[in-house]
Image (cartoon, grey):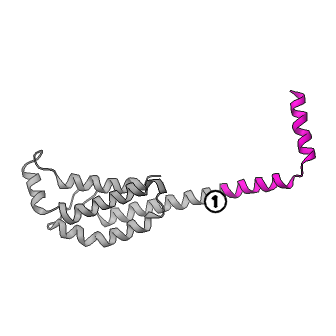
Amino acid sequence: MNEFTDQIAGYFNQVPMWPLVLLGMGIVVTGIYELFHRKRRAEAAEEFRSVILSTLSGLYPEPTNWPKSIDTYLCARLPVMQEIIEYFKQNVPQEDLPAYNRDWDNYCHFCRAEVTDDKCTAAEMNPGIEPDPKKTFHTLVSNLLRHANY
């Protein structure tokens, strides 16, 4: 064992120290950058969640104030949601972007084509037979918000 440690000590006596100092500085800078990047990402995720929750207040997480003409109501909020989605997209990891885009497309399709007051009424009158748009809406919004969990 002493031969091994003597060999390592001899190596450090022979090699100049500047490459090791440079490597150490690089590791420290990378660590600081990673901490900053994680903090910025966490702040963006928190802002994403709060803006979506405030935009959809009364509808998500519990539909306490489900408005009449829900399709018109949700379509009117699509431009704001689009802006939120585009702003947060830069914080989504590259491998998660296809799922993020798919979740957003599903939400848009639901708001434009699938939700109506008639379907909501039919689901309330025939629970279990008709698909409930409120549950579908909750699932779609939850799918969007899961991208902000870091």
Residue at the disc numbered 1: 33
Q: Position of residue 14 (x, y in %)?
A: 93, 46
Please name the amino acid that badge 1 sits on.
Answer: Tyr
Q: Which residues are magenta?
A: 1-30
Q: Secondary structure at mark 1?
A: helix
On-image quarter of the N terminus: top right
| 128 sits left or right of 143 in the view | left
Q: For residue 93, say whether it is visible.
A: no
**Residue 80 in which image quadrant:** bottom left
Magenta span: helix, strand or loop, mainly?
A: helix
Is-magenta flag for residue 12?
A: yes
Residue located 61% across and 56% down the image: 34
Q: Position of residue 56 (x, y in %)?
A: 29, 64
| 31 sits left or right of 120 in the view | right
Residue located 48% across and 61% down the image: 91
Q: For residue 146, say whether it is visible.
A: yes
